[in-house]
Image (tube, grey):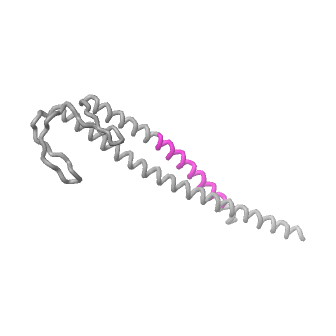
Amino acid sequence: MTIYMKKLRKKHIKMAEQEEKVQKLYIEFHLLNQQIQQLEKQNEALNSNLMELMVTNQSLDELEDIKEKTEILVPVSTGIHAKAEIKDVKSFVVNVGANVALVKDLSSTKKIIENQIGEVRELQESLAGQLQKHTAKAALLEQEISNIASEIQK
């Protein structure tokens, strides 16, 4: 075998290895992008949950100023409300999980909502960290794929 043939064979083997590496990196990149999309969906759900909790907290603040026997509209579903009369603004029936509801005063109810707001914000921070880490890794993979692809093209 001539020196030229050996160099050509060596170059061919190196190209095949690089192509295989690019394929593996691309698969990893694709999986990482799927994880990023899933984390973004979770973040949207957390944002929605946070907004709902904040509206609930504001509603509880507003209920402090409402007098008993005041007529209000109570949401039944999206865009559907029923007229109702306030009987007691000092106590609330609060679902505490596992189909258990307890009567709580306004202060305790607000504390529960504020704790939930804090928990959602902590989850958002954790999720933001994961997103940042995955996005940075995806950028590195993309750059590595690009570099190897450029070498193969030479």
Q: What's the residue at 56%, 52% (across, down)?
A: 138
Main SS class of the magenta portion in the image: helix
Quarter of the rendering occupied by the N terminus:
bottom right
73 on left or right of 151 = left
Q: Nearer the viewer, residue 89 or 126?
A: 89
Indicate the position of residue 60 as horizontal and vertical percent values: 23, 35
Quarter location, residue 85 = top left
State whether residue 146 is above or below residue 133: below
Classify residue 18 as left or right of residue 119.
Answer: right
Residue 45 magenta-drawn? no
Q: Position of residue 76 (x, y in %)?
A: 21, 50
Q: In this rendering, is residue 14 above or below 54?
A: below
- Span colored in magenta: 126-148
At a point 39% along the width and 49% down the height, the residue shown is 44
| Residue 19 picture location, percent across and down | 68, 64
With 13 as the anchor, is 34 left or right in this view? left
The residue drawn where x is 63% and y is 55% is: 144
> Is 21 rendered above or below residue 122?
below
Count of numbered labels shown in the rendering: 0
Quarter of the image for the C terminus: give it: bottom right
Residue at x-position 56% and y-position 58%: 30
Q: Quadrant of residue 61?
A: top left
Nearest the viewer among 62 and 77 is 77
Residue 146 colored in magenta in the image: yes
Q: Position of residue 37 (x, y in %)?
A: 47, 54
Q: Is residue 66 left or right of residue 32?
A: left
Q: Which of 98/109 is in front?
A: 98
Choose top left, top right, bottom left or bottom right for residue 105. top left
